[in-house]
Image (cartoon, rainbow, N blue to C red):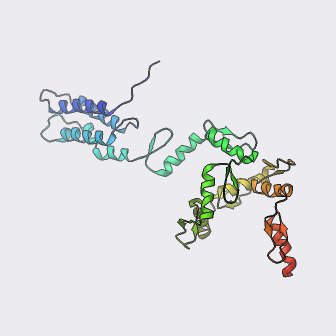
Amino acid sequence: MFYPLQPTFEDGEIELARTEMLAQDPMVDNKHALAVSLARSEMLVQDPMTDHKQALAMSLARSEILVQDPMTEHKHPLAVSLSLGNTLINLNKIKCPQCRKRFDTMEEMQQHRTKHLTENKFKCEICGKEFPSHSSMWKHTKAHTGDRPFVCQICNKGFTQLANLQRHDLVHNGLKPYKCPVCQKAFSQHANMIKHQMLHTGLKPYKCPVCQKAFTQHANMVKHQMLHTGLKPYKCPVCDKAFTQQANMVKHQMLHTGVKPYKCSTCGKAFAQQANMVKHQMLHTGKS
């Protein structure tokens, strides 16, 4: 099988040297050949696979100066139109991390990336959620199985991923490096600060396609959609009762374990769920 060679800095320099020779040779009168040679040099610079693009762009500038020099007889409109500015602009374009294609703006690149997201998706067999890679799908399935191998040494809370445990550790050490620029409220995680900012802006960019209800967070919109589909992907491993949300399944499991982390501040009675504790407290306050 034939594999095309990857263009390199040396390929570009050879072509640029050829361009310079054509420009300087008094015997050359083939202006079109000179233009084509310079055009090919620029193609090498713009090729996303070409190494050392900055140095190659500067070499292209030298060749282009020769073409545009009034003392050089062999100019051609096509060659003159290939400006260094356009070449350097191309070098600064935003590159797709998956296919290396370049775009003028981040928005264009993100729109392009959605095409990749629809290719070779890996689907969770339990809830049908799709992922761009097998590893991300595998991490997600732990939410269904209850497998949480990464445990906090302080509070014994378990996590499916090491990164989540590391973020959780910030809760115990009190470190909150991310501050809201509007109200200065501090957060241990950058993502939580971004979500909080939507309270100030009122922005709810995620809409349910069924009922058009809007949400500030994509995850909340996905959870809401399960009300329409009737999908309950989270099953209690003890009694197989199913839930639309993982948090509700975890709360339910406390009925089996007997853990009651929520205590009434008045009488000390403990509850497995916070909502039940709040209802109980109304007996003391007289509120109904």
Question: Split into 4 quadrants, where in the image is the C terminus?
Answer: bottom right
Q: Residue furthest top?
A: 1
Horizontal relation, residue 67 to residue 277: left or right: left
Q: In the image, is residue 224 above or below residue 35?
A: below
Query: Is 241 in front, or is 84?
Result: 241
Q: Residue furthest front?
A: 153
Q: How many marks?
A: 0
Q: In the image, is residue 274 above or below residue 88?
A: below
Picture quadrant of residue 203: bottom right
Query: Is 49 in front, or is 174?
Result: 174
Residue 203 seen in render: no
Q: In the image, is residue 125 above or below residue 245?
A: above
Q: Residue furthest bottom?
A: 286
Residue at point 81%, 73% (across, down): 264
Q: Residue 72: horizontal and vertical position, in percent?
A: 14, 37
Q: Residue 36: horizontal and vertical position, in percent?
A: 28, 31
Residue at point 24%, 42% (across, down): 61
Picture quadrant of residue 122: top right
Residue at point 36%, 44% (across, down): 91
Residue 47 seen in render: yes
Picture quadrant of residue 248: bottom right
Q: In the image, is residue 188 above or below residue 183?
A: above
Horizontal relation, residue 269 to residue 172: left or right: right
Query: Is 52 in front, or is 277?
Result: 277
Q: Residue 23: horizontal and vertical position, in percent?
A: 18, 33
Q: Residue 2: horizontal and vertical position, in percent?
A: 44, 19
Residue at point 34%, 32% (across, down): 8
